[in-house]
Image: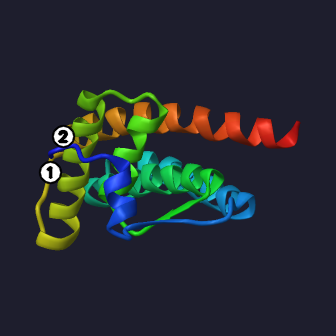
Amino acid sequence: MVLLKFEYYLSKGLVKKRRKNVKLAESLLNSALDRFEFAKRILKTKPKYALEMAYEAVIELIEALLALEGFKSWSHEANIVFLSKIGFTETEIKKFDISRRKRHSSKYYGATFSIGEVKYEIVYMENIFKKVLLEVKKRFDSKRK
């Protein structure tokens, strides 16, 4: 993945500036938390779906953050690039983009991955999830003050 700037996605209309939406962010946050827990529960029996669910949970959490910042995205790549705005390194972003491609291969092209491969991805995605969750919570806390 060539890392484009978040502004590129804005200029192409793949991300739009909107009013900040706390209610949407809360809904996305709750969904993401449930989805990630579900992904961990089904890992051993349904690794394909665990991979997809964990990835979707991270994307939902990023979308919650975007809603709190006043954006709406129609691009998973834009969501991933947004991580650079909250302190993620280029290496972390590129690695998560590999997770995006694996999820895409699984969901749309029937690729399969071993439980070990999926577990590795989920552990990595959980680290991303926790870092994004901290940012979401910071923004909720600042809105409540």
The residue wearing badge 1 is: 113
52 sits to left or right of 118: right
The image shows residue 51 at horizontal and vertical percentages of: 30, 52
- Give the CA separation, mark 2 to mark 1: 6 Å
Give the quarter of the image for residue 92: top left
* Side of 15 where 12 appears, left or right: left
Point out residue 122 in the picture as x, y percentages from the top left corner: 34, 40
Q: Residue type at mark 1?
A: Phe
Point out residue 101 in the picture as x, y percentages from the top left corner: 18, 54
Query: Considering the numbered disc 1 on the image, is that residue within a helix, a strand or a loop?
Result: loop
Instruction: Using the image as rendered, state which of residue 5 and residue 94 is in the foreground.
Output: 5
Taking 39 as reference, is 145 above or below it?
Answer: above
- State which quadrant residue 110 falls in: bottom left
Give the position of the C terminus as an image quadrant: top right
Q: Which mark is residue 90?
A: none
> Which residue is depicted at the point 41% across and 58% down?
56
- The residue at which mark 2 appears reads as 117
Task: Tell me whether circle 2 and circle 1 mark residues in contact (CB < 8 Å).
Answer: yes
Task: Give the residue at x 74% y 42%.
Answer: 140
Question: In this rendering, does residue 89 appear at all?
Answer: yes
